[in-house]
Image (cartoon, grey):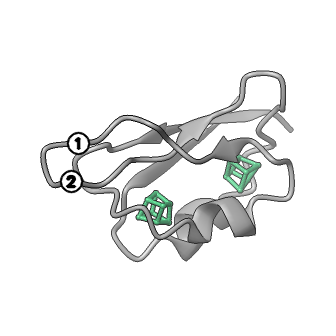
Amino acid sequence: MKGFIKINKVLCKECHLCIVACPKGHIIAGREYNAQGYRPVCTREDRECNGCALCATMCPDIAIEVYRE
Ligand code: SF4
Ligand code: SF4
């Protein structure tokens, strides 16, 4: 199964729980600050998302949406 995620950069609070949860290494720390002073996470395009939704399940701020192909 393949998937992709959308990260809401306004809601993300940089806790990195999603990075720890992702079995594919698809999510990485971000470098750019948002208006709230956090650096939202990003994705690595060389590591495929499998659509498992562990990241969205772990996110306390409901900042990740998962789509399956
Ligand atoms: S859906 Fe699964 S594979 Fe995709 S980014 Fe989230 S935890 Fe990683
Ligand atoms: S778990 Fe949610 S709030 Fe925490 S870094 Fe990931 S997307 Fe941001």
Disc 2 and disc 1: Cα gap in Å? 5 Å
Q: Quadrant of residue 46?
A: top right
Checking the image for residue 26, the label placed there is none
Give the class, few, some or many, for how many residues have Cα within 10 Å of label 1's Cα (few <14, many ≥20).
Answer: some
Q: Residue at x 33, y 70 (%)?
A: 61
Q: Residue furthest top?
A: 45
Q: Nearer the viewer, residue 15 or 23?
A: 15
Mark 2 touches mark 1? (CB < 8 Å): yes
- Please name the amino acid that badge 2 sits on: Gly
The x, y position of residue 34, in whole percent, is: 23, 42
> In this rendering, is residue 25 above or below 14?
above
> In this rendering, is residue 55 above or below 40?
below
Question: Where's the N terminus, which quadrant?
Answer: top right
Q: Residue at x 67, y 59 (%)?
A: 19
Relative to 36, 32 lies left or right: right
> In this rendering, is residue 60 above or below 20?
below
Q: Secondary structure at mark 1?
A: loop
Q: Residue at x 46, y 37 (%)?
A: 31
The x, y position of residue 39, in whole percent, is: 37, 48
Q: Nearer the viewer, residue 63 or 53?
A: 63
Pointer 1 residue Cβ closer than 8 Å to ligand 2: no
Q: What residue is pinned by disc 2?
A: 37
Q: Residue at x 43, y 42 (%)?
A: 7
Q: Secondary structure at mark 2?
A: loop
Relative to 19, 23 lies left or right: right
Question: Where's the C terminus, which quadrant?
Answer: top right
